[in-house]
């Protein structure tokens, strides 16, 4: 039986999961063959019916173990791209995954921020903070996936210079859309966030059939899914059965014979450990925000600046950890609440609604 506080934690994770997936499944996504995109992979199809499953945004204490149970039942390898702010709570689960030769772990940033909306220092902190948490659990990885697949050439170069290999995807499950649509991914839902063509009508009610269709078109590749969504649990087993029935073989992303360029780049990348951070100046020491007395009610905490979904609120006098200032949206700041939830708040212009200073 789950206690009251445990139930609240699970509910919080469920509320945050969809925001992290859909918040910037943004307009402007580009095809996987654009080398500046965060989606890009150097190895291109066909893949001779070899396919690799990857799962983003965990660990989720409720859903990830169920995903793992299904994978183990079929002896399916997979890579889990974990979010740093969930590592402490999911430490035991991460240790379990790391000890199983079927699975591997990779970096998916600390707070699932859009890397095109934070500055260079903020991006480095996202990578380094997550790496440190993983190293504390004896997990060392060079694989990294951009939240929302959001990057450009300059940002990709930054990440590579730090010793990480960006891992995009060839096949987008669209699971976020099926989740938002209650099991169906219609044009009405998909079109709110994407400018690419819609999921064909014949696949709107079956995520597994949609993935299988793409796999057959490409001959395999790397699949993007999320172990934080209910639809993943619904469709994972039918997907595995459907692909195996069509002669597909499941592999890991470190399969050098299928993804030679990806793995060659990893082998030649600069070491990510030990990580040496520059000595922080006083302004770079850990800072907090304090909600000003000028706030009449509360500040919305949004999943992304300006129009992101509201994921929480801060009241007058509340405190939160300060992460970064948006480089593209004036007055917007990335924060992490004391409860561990990450998001963005607006400062009211000239920081009249918040004060930024040393944590006390």
Image: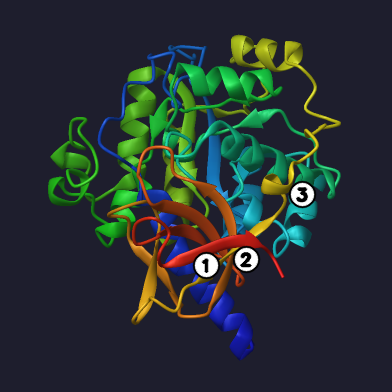
Above/below status of 330 relative to 318? above
Is 121 in front, or is 239? 121
**Marks 2 and 3, how far apart at CA:** 17 Å
Q: Residue at x 70, y 17 (%)?
A: 266
* Residue 231 shows in this picture: no
Instruction: Kindly indicate whether the residue at mark 2 contacts the one at mark 1 (C-beta within 8 angstroms).
Output: yes
Q: Label 2: few (<14), some or many (≥20) within 10 Å?
A: many
**Marks 1 and 2, how far apart at CA:** 8 Å
- Quadrant location, the N terminus: bottom right
Is 78 in front, or is 280? 280
Tag in front: 2 or 3 = 3
Q: Residue at x 52, y 80 (%)?
A: 317
Indicate how the structure is coloured in the image: rainbow
Mark 1 = which residue? 13
Looking at the rendered structure, the secondary structure element under dot 1 is helix
Tag in front: 1 or 2 = 1
The circle drawn on residue 133 is 3
Is 21 situated left or right of 228 in this image? left
**Of the image marks 3 and 1, the number of the one nearer the N terminus:** 1
The circle drawn on residue 128 is none
Residue 144 in the image: state x and y as whole percent: 61, 32
Residue 93 in the image: state x and y as whole percent: 73, 58
Mark 2 = which residue? 61
Is 198 situated left or right of 214 in this image? left
Residue 164 in the image: state x and y as whole percent: 67, 25
**Of the image marks 1 and 2, the number of the one nearer the N terminus:** 1
- Quadrant location, the C terminus: bottom right
Identify the image quadrant of residue 320.
bottom right
């Amino acid at each position: 039986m789950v206690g009251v506080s445990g139930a609240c934690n699970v509910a919080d994770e469920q509320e945050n999961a969809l925001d992290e997936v859909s918040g910037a499944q943004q307009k402007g996504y580009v095809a996987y063959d654009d080398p500046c995109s965060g989606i890009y992979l150097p190895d291109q199809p066909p893949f001779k019916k070899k396919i690799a499953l990857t799962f983003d945004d965990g660990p989720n204490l409720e859903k990830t173990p169920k995903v793992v149970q299904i994978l183990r039942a079929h002896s399916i390898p997979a890579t889990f791209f974990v979010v740093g702010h969930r590592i402490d709570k999911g430490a035991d689960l991460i240790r379990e995954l790391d000890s199983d030769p079927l699975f591997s772990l990779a970096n998916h940033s600390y707070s699932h921020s859009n890397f095109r909306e934070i500055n260079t220092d903020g991006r480095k902190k996202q990578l380094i903070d997550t790496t440190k948490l993983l190293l504390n659990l004896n997990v060392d990885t060079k694989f990294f996936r951009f939240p929302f697949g959001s990057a450009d050439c300059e940002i990709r170069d930054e990440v590579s210079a730090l010793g990480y290999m960006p891992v995009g995807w060839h096949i987008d499950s669209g699971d976020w859309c099926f989740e938002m649509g209650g099991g169906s991914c219609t044009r009405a839902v998909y079109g709110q966030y994407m400018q690419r063509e819609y999921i064909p009508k014949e696949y709107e009610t079956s995520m597994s059939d949609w993935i299988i269709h793409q796999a057959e078109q490409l001959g395999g590749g790397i699949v993007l899914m999320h172990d934080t969504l209910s639809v993943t649990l619904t469709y994972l087993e039918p997907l595995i059965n459907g692909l195996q029935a069509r002669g597909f073989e499941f592999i890991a992303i470190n399969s050098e014979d299928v993804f030679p360029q990806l793995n060659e780049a990893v082998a030649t990348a600069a070491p990510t450990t030990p990580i040496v951070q520059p000595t922080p100046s006083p302004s770079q020491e850990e800072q907090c925000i304090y909600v000003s007395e000028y706030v009449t009610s509360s500040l919305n905490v949004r999943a992304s600046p300006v129009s992101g979904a509201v994921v929480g609120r801060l009241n007058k006098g509340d405190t939160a950890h300060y992460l970064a200032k948006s480089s593209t949206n004036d007055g917007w700041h990335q924060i992490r609440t004391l409860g561990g939830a990450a998001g963005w708040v607006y400062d009211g212009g000239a920081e009249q609604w918040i004060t930024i200073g040393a944590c006390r």
